[in-house]
Amino acid sequence: MDPATPRAPFDAHVIVCQGTSCTEKGQGLPARELRTALFDSGLQHRVRVSRVTCLNLCSLSPNAVVYGAAPVPGAPGGGAWYCGLTPSKVRRVVEEHLRDGRPVTDLLVRWDDPSVSP
Ligand code: FES
């Protein structure tokens, strides 16, 4: 990269749902694990984390979306929509997707599944 080219302030953006359904089902643990895993991986300054109150996929909660790191073709906005998150699944998202650039395909929302409905 040209040294004169400004570097983006972060490489990826994670949107974490902390709405009622996601919070109750996950007991707040996925969001906490996200912060811990980002620090453990040294990514805390390269990944921005934002919270929202609902991603409209409450039946699959707890949920989060990753943008900017290895886009997922066919997914809304190219984001990687992760559902049913547990602390161990969050750690996989951080290590495999955010650190290594490989979306965790077995945790992604299946948009082609007719049972997936907001
Ligand atoms: S509360 Fe999280 S998707 Fe609705």
Image (tube, rainbow, N blue to C red):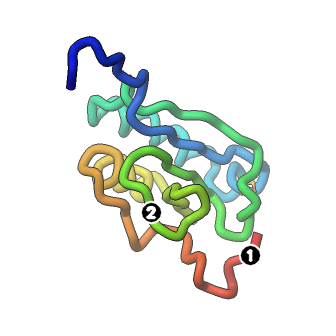
Specify the amino acid type for callout 1. Ser
- Confirm if mark 2 falls within 8 A of ligand 1: no
Q: What residue is shown with label 1?
A: 117
Dot 1 falls on a residue whose secondary structure is loop
Quarter holding the N terminus?
top left
In the rendered image, residue 53, in percent from the top left (x then y), is placed at 76, 44
Q: What residue is shown with label 2?
A: 72
Q: Residue at x 42, y 33 (%)?
A: 47
Q: Residue at x 43, y 38 (%)?
A: 12
- Confirm if mark 1 falls within 8 A of ligand 1: no
User: Height in image: 113 above or below 8?
Assistant: below
Instruction: Using residue 50 as the reference point, say whether residue 100 is left or right of it.
Output: left
User: Height in image: 58 above or below 64?
Assistant: below
State the residue in front, 103 or 91: 103
In the rendered image, residue 65, in percent from the top left (x then y), is placed at 55, 52
Q: Earlier in the sequence, mark 2 or mark 1?
A: 2
In the rendered image, residue 44, in percent from the top left (x then y), is placed at 38, 27
Instruction: Using residue 51 as the reference point, say whether residue 2 is left or right of it.
Output: left
